Image (spheres, grey):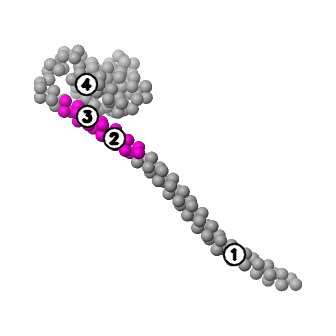
Amino acid sequence: MQKLLTIVDISKMTGIPPSTLRYYRDVYSNCIYIFTVGEGKRKRYLLEAVDVFLTISKSTKQGLSTETIISILKENHSILNKTHDHNITEKLNNEQIAFIQTINQLLDTTIKMFVQQNQEISHLHSEIEIKSKEIEKRIESQVKNSFNSFYNKLNPLIEETVKNTLAELFKKRV
């Protein structure tokens, strides 16, 4: 039977701080690539988790996105791709393997959907920014036109008032 590892054990093996390992675990909690047993403080990890955490750490340091890291994990750390560890695959019956394959397909679909939605959101942000600038220019132009129109209407009145006031003052002085 394989030895189960704690976060601290994995930290000592990898040099990755326990808090970082927990962060990776939480970020990639939806992945089936981090094999765990137990809950809470009794949670233990199979030895395969060490390679997964190292892959995540290396990929993060390279600046890769979460989606890219998940793709890398899927390629390199899939349960069904582990030919060197027959202990896990031998225990799986055909129904379990089919279930895992279905889950992997669902994960693929979900990841693709998230990537597509992220691209759509990015595109929408760009469109909103362009529209906002267009609206801002339109409003600025309308305000400028309104001001010019107001000024053009008011200016003759001001000039007439000043002229009349000066004329009255001049008459009083003379």
* Sequence-wise first label, 1 or 2: 2
* Residue picked out by circle 1: 156
Q: CA distance from mark 4 to mark 2?
A: 23 Å
* Residue picked out by circle 3: 107
Horizontal and vertical percent position of residue 27: 34, 33
Name which residue type carries label 2. Answer: Gln
**Marks 4 and 1: which is nearer the front?**
1
**Marks 3 and 1: which is nearer the front?**
1
Q: Which mark is residue 116?
A: 2
Magenta stretch, residue numbers:
101-123
Horizontal and vertical percent position of residue 91: 14, 21
How packed mark 1 is, by other alpha carbons closer than 10 Å (few <14, some 14-19, many 20 or more), is few
Horizontal and vertical percent position of residue 134: 50, 55
* Rendered residue at 47%/53% (across/down): 131
| Marks 4,2: beta carbons within 8 A | no
Q: Secondary structure at mark 3?
A: helix
**Marks 4 and 2: which is nearer the front?**
2
How packed mark 3 is, by other alpha carbons closer than 10 Å (few <14, some 14-19, many 20 or more), is some
* Residue picked out by circle 4: 78
Name which residue type carries label 3. Answer: Leu
Q: CA distance from mark 1 to mark 2?
A: 60 Å
* Sequence-wise first label, 3 or 4: 4
Towards the viewer: 55 or 122: 122
* Sequence-wise first label, 4 or 1: 4
Horizontal and vertical percent position of residue 39: 24, 30
* Rendered residue at 83%/84% (across/down): 171
| Marks 3,2: beta carbons within 8 A | no
Q: What is the quadrant of residue 23 in the picture? A: top left
